Image (cartoon, rainbow, N blue to C red):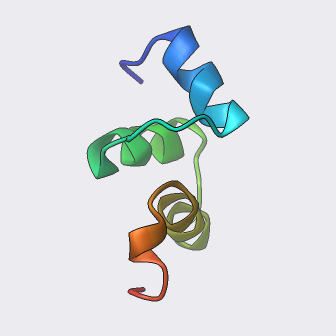
Amino acid sequence: MGVSRGWYAMLERGEPIQPSIAMLNRVAQALNATRDERVTLLQLAIPELQGLF
């Protein structure tokens, strides 16, 4: 995915990080996420995106 274990651990713990959409897409791709799962991931990670899709 191109991220460190520490960064991914912070993401999982919900720590205040600011992942880019590109980074979140790489995470979703690595997890073989469906479109709906990708949308949920983006909305959870970037609250400003809620309701946009």
Residue at x 56%, y 24% (from the top left corner)? 8
Tell me residue 15's x, y (percent). 60, 34
Tell me residue 51's x, y (percent). 47, 88
Residue at x 46%, y 36% (from the top left corner)? 17
Residue at x 51%, y 68% (from the top left corner)? 43
Please state which of residues 40 and 45 is positioned toward the viewer in this rendering: 45
Image quarter of the N terminus:
top left
Side of 23 relative to 40 (left or right) = left
Residue at the far top: name it.
5
Image quarter of the C terminus:
bottom left
Please state which of residues 27 and 17 is positioned toward the viewer in this rendering: 17
Tell me residue 5's x, y (percent). 56, 11
Residue at the far front: name it.
16
Q: From what the image shows, is residue 20 above or below residue 8?
A: below
Side of 50 relative to 23 (left or right) = right
Side of 13 relative to 28 (left or right) = right
Residue at x 59%, y 54% (from the top left corner)? 33
Q: How many marks?
A: 0
Please state which of residues 1 and 40 is positioned toward the viewer in this rendering: 40
| Location of residue 52 (image quadrant) | bottom left
Please state which of residues 16 and 27 is positioned toward the viewer in this rendering: 16
Q: From what the image shows, is residue 13 above or below residue 38?
A: above
